[in-house]
Image: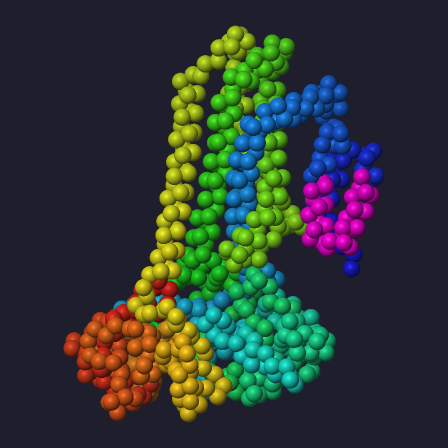
């Protein structure tokens, strides 16, 4: 495959280069590029090509513009350029300070621009992006309105039923539909074990329905994407996973792979490694039907996506989907469910729910940091203006002499703006160089994989525009001020600032320092917030606490007991216990049944003594061992801890937190009965509230 240098810079060179020189210089450039390509790789070859083109943009090589074939005009421009270069070299300290100020401002602006572009690109690489939508649900109850991206699910005769199934036939505007199980992805899910011969690896993946690869642009490099997930025994794996087990993607097709030492799947497709800009992360995809029929089912991990026709009205599609789904939902369920659609590419930046609808989210950070980038660049420009006007007395005589010999004000403005743009151009080159050293550190800090978009024409248009605007803005006031000076007073050496000029300069200084102070205060606040998040007490003792997943033979109670006994006796281990939920990421379950006989779902309800019909509370439930409260160092505000001395504790004892008591409306809760998933018992203790998720989230029962 023949590699080419960045096309936008090759076209730029061909545009500015003198026709008599183009053939020879372009040949040398391409020869150098091919040599660097072999020795250093495409990335470095592209970068050096860009630098070469930029350095060639100089008067001796630039072709004469059509409007300046007159040698006097061209010579004047050339003279202005020479004067600008001489002034920069003559005043090295001043030039260095200006260039460094603009360099730092531009570098910060570029870093933020690249981060913003990366954020906006997340999930926006799919070919069907404009017609691809996530399904979300709005939950309405008597006392709250909430929303999430889960898919409504019912359990009928011990079987799973998804009310959204069949929506493509019922709603003509919906072309395709796909289900996806996000609950198996890290960080909330877990890696699963695969084996081929002696090769055994734990990998992260998920389950998807048959149309998944037809809707999403995850490149299938071997196998048929249309039929990759059609069969219940099918599995699609990544290039990385194929090379891990079978040495190459070609050898993997049709091979058998053992899953969790339970089932065998046949490899039907190989897809390219999932790109970093995808929010869906998986090394493998198992057929969705296998997930429903053969594997363990978790009721809160289903996601649904639809692809609509390009001409579809989304509001009408939402209404049609709800008309189709509502009769298939439980009429007596509480809260009531209403479905909505959100463009899949918007979900990453707009994933916070307000009043049951997705509003805000990471887009707020994108807007804030975009504003910060503009502020930083403005500070750099104002710094340039202040330095330039402070030196105005030194250049006043030059202005006077030029005016005396016939130079117009427009020519002087062009001269000073040209110098500012030249300094801005030097700062731009310095920023690109500095960016190469800073980007790895920036990526480590942000957890990104950002690179300089050498081949992205839109990015270069933005960066070039930023450079020109910076030069124009920073040089505008000095240019207009210096060009307005009277030749008589300047030649006499008496340059006086008018009141308006003095006021404007003072205003610039005040504005610059105000912005700087605002940014400093913001930095301090963010730093203190980060420190608060890292060091605040969560309500339990997280120091020296290690969490591992129970899997394999450890799920056997007898094997777990042996493990716990032996682990507790190991040096350095004080205590061991287990929980069905990770302490820092407890799942959220909405009590959506009132437990009345007519619902037929009384066994699934969370009920308590004194619960009113139709009353709904969202809980974070967990089953734990006898030592869990001690291990986590949770505070008991009323009642007692679980105890082996009480034989009934292992079967019918509950502990709840203060928020649960509040939302359940219990007075004197100790001894009151509670029923959850057919297990009925009594409350023996009240725990002080502790954080089980993000600090942004309110305490949950």
Q: Nearer the viewer, residue 132 or 4?
A: 4
Q: Position of residue 265 (x, y in %)?
A: 61, 84
Q: Nearer the viewer, residue 590 or 162?
A: 590
514 drawn magenta: no
Q: Residue at x 36, y 52 (%)?
A: 528
Looking at the image, which residue sits at the far front? 571
27 drawn magenta: yes
Q: Nearer the viewer, residue 627 or 200?
A: 627
Name the chief secondary structure element in magenta.
helix
Q: Residue at x 39, y 86 (%)?
A: 565
347 horizontally vs 684: left or right: right
Q: Residue at x 83, y 33 (%)?
A: 20
Q: How many marks?
A: 0
The residues colored magenta run 25-53
From what the image shows, is residue 222 above or below residue 484?
Answer: below
Quarter of the picture containing the N terminus is bottom right
Residue 605 makes an appearance in the image: no
Q: Position of residue 267 (x, y in %)?
A: 65, 80
Q: Position of residue 330 (x, y in %)?
A: 37, 80
From what the image shows, is residue 71 above or below residue 577?
Answer: above
Looking at the image, which residue sits at the far left? 668
Residue 238 makes an appearance in the image: yes
Q: Position of residue 416 (x, y in %)?
A: 58, 24
Quarter of the picture containing the C terminus is bottom left
């Amino acid at each position: 495959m023949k590699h080419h240098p960045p096309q936008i810079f090759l076209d730029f060179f061909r545009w500015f280069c003198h026709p008599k020189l183009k053939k020879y210089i372009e040949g040398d450039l391409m020869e150098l590029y091919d040599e660097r390509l072999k020795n250093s790789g495409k990335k470095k070859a592209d970068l050096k090509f860009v630098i070469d083109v930029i350095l060639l943009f100089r008067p001796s090589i630039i072709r004469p513009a059509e409007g300046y074939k007159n040698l006097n005009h061209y010579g004047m421009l050339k003279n202005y350029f020479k004067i600008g270069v001489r002034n920069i070299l003559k005043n090295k300290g001043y030039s260095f300070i200006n260039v460094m100020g603009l360099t730092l401002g531009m570098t910060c602006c570029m870093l933020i621009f690249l981060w913003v572009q990366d954020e906006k690109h997340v999930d926006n690489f799919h070919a069907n992006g404009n017609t691809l939508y996530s399904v979300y649900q709005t939950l309405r109850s008597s006392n709250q309105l909430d929303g999430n991206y889960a898919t409504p699910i019912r359990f009928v005769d011990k079987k799973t039923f998804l009310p959204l199934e069949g929506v493509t036939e019922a709603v003509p505007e919906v072309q395709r539909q796909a289900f996806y199980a996000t609950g198996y992805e890290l960080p909330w899910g877990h890696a699963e074990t695969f084996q081929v011969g002696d090769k055994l690896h734990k990998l992260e993946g998920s389950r998807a329905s048959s149309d998944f690869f037809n809707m999403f642009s995850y490149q299938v490099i071997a196998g048929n994407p249309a039929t990759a997930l059609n069969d219940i025994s099918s599995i699609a794996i990544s290039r990385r996973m194929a090379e891990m087990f079978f040495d190459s993607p070609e050898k993997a097709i049709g091979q058998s792979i053992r899953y969790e030492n339970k089932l065998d799947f046949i490899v039907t497709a190989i897809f390219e490694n999932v790109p970093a800009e995808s929010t869906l992360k998986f090394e493998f995809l198992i057929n969705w039907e296998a997930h429903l029929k053969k594997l363990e089912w978790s009721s809160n991990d289903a996601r649904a996506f639809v692809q609509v026709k390009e001409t579809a009205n989304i509001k009408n599609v939402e209404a049609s989907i709800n008309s189709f789904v509502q009769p298939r939902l439980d009429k007596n369920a509480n809260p009531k469910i209403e479905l909505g659609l959100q463009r899949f590419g918007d979900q990453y930046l707009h994933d916070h729910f307000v009043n049951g609808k997705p509003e805000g989210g990471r887009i707020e950070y994108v807007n804030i940091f975009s504003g910060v980038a503009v502020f930083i660049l403005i500070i750099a420009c104002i710094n340039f203006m202040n330095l330039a006007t402070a030196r105005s007395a030194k250049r006043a005589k030059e202005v006077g002499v030029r005016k005396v010999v016939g130079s117009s004000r427009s020519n002087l403005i062009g001269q000073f703006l040209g110098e500012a743009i030249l300094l801005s151009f030097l700062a731009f080159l310095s920023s690109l160089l500095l960016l190469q050293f800073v980007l790895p550190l920036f990526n480590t800090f942000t957890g990104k994989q950002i690179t300089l978009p050498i081949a992205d024409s839109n990015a270069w248009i933005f960066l070039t525009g930023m450079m020109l605007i910076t030069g124009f803005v920073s040089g505008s006031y000095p240019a207009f001020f210096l060009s307005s000076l009277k030749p008589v007073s300047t030649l006499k050496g008496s340059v006086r600032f008018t009141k308006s000029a003095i006021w404007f300069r003072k205003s610039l200084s005040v504005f610059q320092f105000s912005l700087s102070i605002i940014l400093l205060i913001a930095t301090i606040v963010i730093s203190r917030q980060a420190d608060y998040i890292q060091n605040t007490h969560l309500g339990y003792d997280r120091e020296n606490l290690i969490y591992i997943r129970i899997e394999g033979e450890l799920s056997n109670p007898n094997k777990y007991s042996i493990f716990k006994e032996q682990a507790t006796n190991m040096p350095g281990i004080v205590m061991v216990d287990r929980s069905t939920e990770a302490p820092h990421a407890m799942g959220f379950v909405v009590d959506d049944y009132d437990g009345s006989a007519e619902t037929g779902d009384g066994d699934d309800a969370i009920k308590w003594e004194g619960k009113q019909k139709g009353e709904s509370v969202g809980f974070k439930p967990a089953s734990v061992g006898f030592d869990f409260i001690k291990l986590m160092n949770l505070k008991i505000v009323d009642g007692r801890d679980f105890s082996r001395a009480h034989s009934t504790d292992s079967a019918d004892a509950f502990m709840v937190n203060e928020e649960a008591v509040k939302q359940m409306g219990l007075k004197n809760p100790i001894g009151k009965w509670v029923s959850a998933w057919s297990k009925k018992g009594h409350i023996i203790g009240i725990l002080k509230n502790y954080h089980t998720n993000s600090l942004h989230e309110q305490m949950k029962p």
